[in-house]
Amino acid sequence: MATIKPFRGIRPPKELVEKVESRPYDVLDSDEARAEAEGNPMSLYHIIRPEIDFPVGTDEHDPRVYPKAAENFQMFQDKGWLVQDKKECYYIYAQTMGTHTQYGLVVCAYVDDYMNGVIKKHELTRADKEEDRMKHVRVNNANVEPVFFAFPDNAVLDAIVRRYAATEPVYDFIAPIDGFGHKFWIIDDDADIRTITEEFAKMPSLYIADGHHRSAAAARVCAEKAQQNPNHRGDEEYNYFMAVCFPAGQLTIFDLNRVVRDLNGLTPAQFLEQVSEGFVVEKKGTDIYKPTGLHNFSLYLEGEWYSLTARPGTYDDSDPIGVLDVSICSDLILHKILGIGDLRKDKRIDFVGGIRGLGELKRRVDSGEMKVAIALYPVTMKQLMTIADTGNIMPPKTTWFEPKLRSGLVIHKLS
C-alpha cells in the first residue's frame, strides 16, 4: 500500500509566483531557457537550467553548472523569492487546458515504495539523464521539480479537493506560451491531512505518468544519504520525494507521433508497397487524416495522407506490449522497412507530441526536413496501468501528457 506524507514546501510569495514559475527543465533547451529568463533574475531557470548564467554555448552538464544551481537556490531563499512553509502540508495543483481541468494532490512519496514496486513505472530510464537529475537533487538537497503520478480514482479525495477548489486559490495564473491555466491551494487542516494520508494508504499502487528519471534520481540520492547516515531510520526527509498525483480518470494521454528523415533507400512507391504487406493502405488525399482508433495509423508522404490499418495476424492480442500501436508501428514499419533500431538513439527519427497537431507533421515533411510522418492513436490510461501492473515496460516514446507541470510552485527539501 502507498505511503505518503505532507511536507514543508518551499514556495514563492503569491505576488512573485509568475516571476519564479517556469516550464520543466526537460521540455526546452538552453537557448530557449536563456531567452525565457532574459531580464528576470527570479526565473526558476536559474536553478533548473543554471547553464544560462554562463556564456552561451556552455554545456548543461559542465561541472560548474551544478554548484551554480545550488548557489542560486540558496540566493532565492535569502532574497525571499522562495519561502518555506512553517507547517507540513499537502497542496492541490489544478491545470486547465481548454475546457478540461485536472486536480492533483502534491505529496511526498516514499522511496521504498518506488524500490518495492508499489510505485509502478512503465518506461526505462537512460543512465545519462538519471545521472544528471541525481547530481541536481544531490547538490540542491531538494526535489526542485515534481514527478507526475496517477492514482486510481477515489471519491473521498475528490470530495476534499472539490471543497478546497471552491475557495480562493493561493496562486492563479495563465502560463505564457501555451496559455494553460494553473491554480494552487494549501491543505493545512490536520483532519484533511490525516484523511489524505489514510486514503493513499489504501491504494495498492501509484503510477509514474511522467518523471521516471526524477524518480530514479531521488531513489539514488536517498540510498547515498542512508549509507552516509550511521543512524539511518528510514523516516528521514530524504526518504521521500515530491510528486503531483492525479486521479487516472482525469488524465488524457496524447499521441506521440513519428517523423523520419528518409525512406532507407526506397522510392515512395516501393515504400508503400512494403507497408501494404502489414497494413491495409487507403489514400486519403491532401486533407489531414487523423487515426480513428486503435491499430489505425495515418501516414503523410509526398503531399498525400494515407490510412493504414494493421492486418489481422500482424500483432498478438494477448501480448500487452506487442498489441500497442507503438509496437506495431516499430515492428512493421520503422524496424522492418526503414531500418530504425533504437528509437532513443537513431538520429533519423524524431517525435512530435500530439498537442502540436498533425499539421506539425505535415509542416516538417513539406519543409524537406523529413521524408515521411506517421501518426498514432494515443495509448489509454487503462493500457498504461495494465502494463505497469503486469511488470512490463512500454516501448520508448509511447506517451505524451499535457499540460506539463509548471515548476517552481513548490519545492521539497530533503532535510
Image (tube, rainbow, N blue to C red):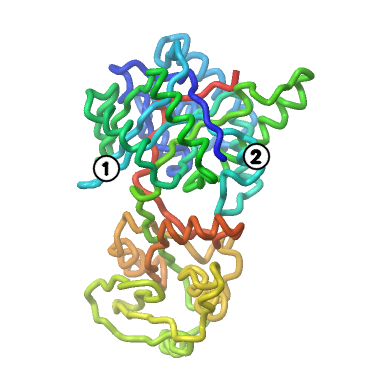
Q: Position of residue 355 (x, y in %)?
A: 32, 54
Instruction: Answer with mark 2 or mark 1, whichever residue precedes in sequence.
Output: 1
Is 262 rendered above or below residue 111?
A: below
Left or right of 23? Residue 218 is right
The amino acid on which the numbered mark 2 sits, given as a three-letter code, is Glu
What residue does disc 2 label?
131
Would you say the residues marked 2 and 1 are in contact, meaning their CB atoms lie under 8 Å apart?
A: no
Residue situated in front as seen by the camera: 355 or 292: 292
Q: Residue at x 33, y 22 (%)?
A: 17
Residue 251 position, x and y percent, is 36, 49
Q: Which quadrant of the figure has residue 164?
A: top left
Q: Is residue 41 in view?
A: no
Distance between the alpha carbons at the discs numbered 2 and 1: 34 Å
**Number of residues whose C-alpha sits closer than 10 Å to that of mark 1, classed few (under 14), some (14–19) or many (20 or more):** some
Q: Secondary structure at mark 1?
A: strand
Q: Nearer the viewer, residue 227 or 71?
A: 227
> Residue 52: where, in percent of width, then height?
47, 30
Kind of residue at badge 1 = Thr
At 42% from the left and 54% from the top, the residue drawn is 400
User: Which residue matches tag 1?
Assistant: 101
Quarter of the figure with residue 258 = bottom left
Taking the image as shown, residue 56 lies to the left or right of residue 112, namely: left
